[in-house]
Image (cartoon, rainbow, N blue to C red):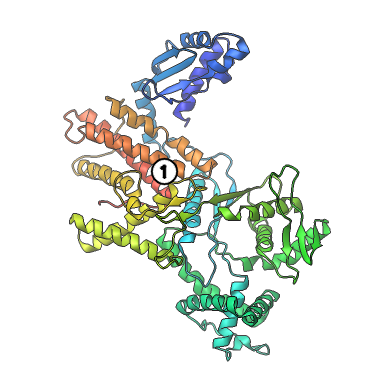
């Protein structure tokens, strides 16, 4: 189904063509002066240069060809050469009714589906999720859902940090505490226990303890580096310990991501890329790209057009150990081998931009990925506290994500109990739903690349541009629909042409749905959907306050209003699902 603005543009382009001008000048946009008109075309201004004619004369020529158009209520040519349009109520009502009868609201699936991989996790194993993991998970999940809705084949990968020095630190500390374990006996050749020698709680305590010791004790750090090297070289007992760490950690991570309504198709880690590293290094050497620099193996990736210095991409350290660049390149090798993706999107902190510039260039230079594969860095800004600095606990530490979610959940629960309209169990369920919306919408409504203030009071408010406000609007619509459905069928209802200014404004907002989703996909920007649904809620609430819906005495009109509510509700619920949350039945 064509977008309304495309249909209007086609009509205006035809008028340009019939008046003797190139139709390329007939592109129509939303009006930037909604007080004057609904749509506008500025093409006459640009055409004036080509045709050496006053723009107002061109606009008036085009206007004559639109006199009999059934599409518009009015068309005006305004000096110095603008064309202003108001769409006819009949045409708008018929278009919105077609959206209502389509299960995708007029948005066709892509005819050319791509295979898209999204890397949007990145947590380190053996450590709990903290607030720094929120943005990657929330943005990545939404980008995944939007891409799937467009019709692409999308694969989400958590990409665990499970291979670096942290593993060596855990092994070293565990050896110190339990030296009798068979994993540390190099001569042991039996089966290793299926049960891990630690719990998730012990594991979460072991890592920070080991990390702290390594900063103060050089000998301890050297032992950890040696353990890391032996693990990467394939020491059997250490690999068995890694498997235990992964099993325990991944189970815990899945529970925490579930609370965020975030899921991954793949639970791969850096360790899964290890088998591909030797051949990848050989490829870089054979192609003459890799060379030694101060003992390390590097690849030059700078380009003549660079405006800032891009250092060589380091492949192996001087001791032969791998780095993030090594594992990220090797990960690309297996992603291409197993999935042959057309796009790979990395949802990561802005501060990693240079790392990914190096990795992407090296991958393209070496032919690890095809030239037509799009490697994309979707960098996000910092989530800051009310003081404008990175979000911390009161004692200055990094807050665990589950603690932050619990804090917001409790705040919402207490707010709901204050209303005294539901029992404790229902209040807990509703609070969980609304608090997740508060967190996700609070994050996603900001442009991903920008820093933002995580303001608990603002995000949990039911007024303004917030998740709870969006949910309150949906619940309001559901309440009206449920009352209507109690005595009436909603089958075979049709949207009528608008009978008031507020009804028309609501319809004009609804027709922006398709473009909002397409733009959000093309720009990997869930914030575009947030902007759309906030405006839609605003227009609906104005319509609600100005219109008698259930008490309308004209049955035909009432059915038209109910159809409009059904469409508004369905579009809002579709959009919040793409953002990764849902609405309760009541609040």
Left or right: 373 as drawn, with respect to 396 = right
* Residue drawn at x 66%, y 79% as measured from the top left: 222
The answer to whether 467 is drawn above or below residue 325 in the figure is above
Is any part of residue 549 visible from this angle? yes
Q: Is residue 528 above or below residue 344?
A: above
Residue occupying image coordinates x 53% and y 10%:
58
Disc 1: which residue: 530
Specify whether residue 263 is in view: no
Residue 519 % position (x, y): 50, 38
Q: From the viewer's perspective, is residue 131 above or below residue 470?
A: below
Between 336 and 346, the one nearer to me in the picture:
346
Q: Which residue is at the front of the view, 133 or 144?
A: 133
Q: Quadrant of residue 180?
A: bottom right
Vertical arrangement, residue 488 with respect to residue 358, above or below: above
Determine which quarter of the picture holds residue 334: bottom right
On screen, residue 530 versus residue 587, left or right, reads right
Residue at (61, 9) in percent of width and height: 52
- The count of marks equals 1
Q: Position of residue 63 (x, y in %)?
A: 47, 11
Is 526 or 426 nearer to us in this picture?
A: 526
Q: Position of residue 162 (x, y in %)?
A: 59, 69
Q: Residue furthest bottom?
A: 180
Q: Residues within 10 Å of mark 1 (few under 14, many from 20)?
A: many
Secondary element at image label 1: helix
Where in the figure is residue 541, as x and y percent of width and height?
28, 37
């Amino acid at each position: 189904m064509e977008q309304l603005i495309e249909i209007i543009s086609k009509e205006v382009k035809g008028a340009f063509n019939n008046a003797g001008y190139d139709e390329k000048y007939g592109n129509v946009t939303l009006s930037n002066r909604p007080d004057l008109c609904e749509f506008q075309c500025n093409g006459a201004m640009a055409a004036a240069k080509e045709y050496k004619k006053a723009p107002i004369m061109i606009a008036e020529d085009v206007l004559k060809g639109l006199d009999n158009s059934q599409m518009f209520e009015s068309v005006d040519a305004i000096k110095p050469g603008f064309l202003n349009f108001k769409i006819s109520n009949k045409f708008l009502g018929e278009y919105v009714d077609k959206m209502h009868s389509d299960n995708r609201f007029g948005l066709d699936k892509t005819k050319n589906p791509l295979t898209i991989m999204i890397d949007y996790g990145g947590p380190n194993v053996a450590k709990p999720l903290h607030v720094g993991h929120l943005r990657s998970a929330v943005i990545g999940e939404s980008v995944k859902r939007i891409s799937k809705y467009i019709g692409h084949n999308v694969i989400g990968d958590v990409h665990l940090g499970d291979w670096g020095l942290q593993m060596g630190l855990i092994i070293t500390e565990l050896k110190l505490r339990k030296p009798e374990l068979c994993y540390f006996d190099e001569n042991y050749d039996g089966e290793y226990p299926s049960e891990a020698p630690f719990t998730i709680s012990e594991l979460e305590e072991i890592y920070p303890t080991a990390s702290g010791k390594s900063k103060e004790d050089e000998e301890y750090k050297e032992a950890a580096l040696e353990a890391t090297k032996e693990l990467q070289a394939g020491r059997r007992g250490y690999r068995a310990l890694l498997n235990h760490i992964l099993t325990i950690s991944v189970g815990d991570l899945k529970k925490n991501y579930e609370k965020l309504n975030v899921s991954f198709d793949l639970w791969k880690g850096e360790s899964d890329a290890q088998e591909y590293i030797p051949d990848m290094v050989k490829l870089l050497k054979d192609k003459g790209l890799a060379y030694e620099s101060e003992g390390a193996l590097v690849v030059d990736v700078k380009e003549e057009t660079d405006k800032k210095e891009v250092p060589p991409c380091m492949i192996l350290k001087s001791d032969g150990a791998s780095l993030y660049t090594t594992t990220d390149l090797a990960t690309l090798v297996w992603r291409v081998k197993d999935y042959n993706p057309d796009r790979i999107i990395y949802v990561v902190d802005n501060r990693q931009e240079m790392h990914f510039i190096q990795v992407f260039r090296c991958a393209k230079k070496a032919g690890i990925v095809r030239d037509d594969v799009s490697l994309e860095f979707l960098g996000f800004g910092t989530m800051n506290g009310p003081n404008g600095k990175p979000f911390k606990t009161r004692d200055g530490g990094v807050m665990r994500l589950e603690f932050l979610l619990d804090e917001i959940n409790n705040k919402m629960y207490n707010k709901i109990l204050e209303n005294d309209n539901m029992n404790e169990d229902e209040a807990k369920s509703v609070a969980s739903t609304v608090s997740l919306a508060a967190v996700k919408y609070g994050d996603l409504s900001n442009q991903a690349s920008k820093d933002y203030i995580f303001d608990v009071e603002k995000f949990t408010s039911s007024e303004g541009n917030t998740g709870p406000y969006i949910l309150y609007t949906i619940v309001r619509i559901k309440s009206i629909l449920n009352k209507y459905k109690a005595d009436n069928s909603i089958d075979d209802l049709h949207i009528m042409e608008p009978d008031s200014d507020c009804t028309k404004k609501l319809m004009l907002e609804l027709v922006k749905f398709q473009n909002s989703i397409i733009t959000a996909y093309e720009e990997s920007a869930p914030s575009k959907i947030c902007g759309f649904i906030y405006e839609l809620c605003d227009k609906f609430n104005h319509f609600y306050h100005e219109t008698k819906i259930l008490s309308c005495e004209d049955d035909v009109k009432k059915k038209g209003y109910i159809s409009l509510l059904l469409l508004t509700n369905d579009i809002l619920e579709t959009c919040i699902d793409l953002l990764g949350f849902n609405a309760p039945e009541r609040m």
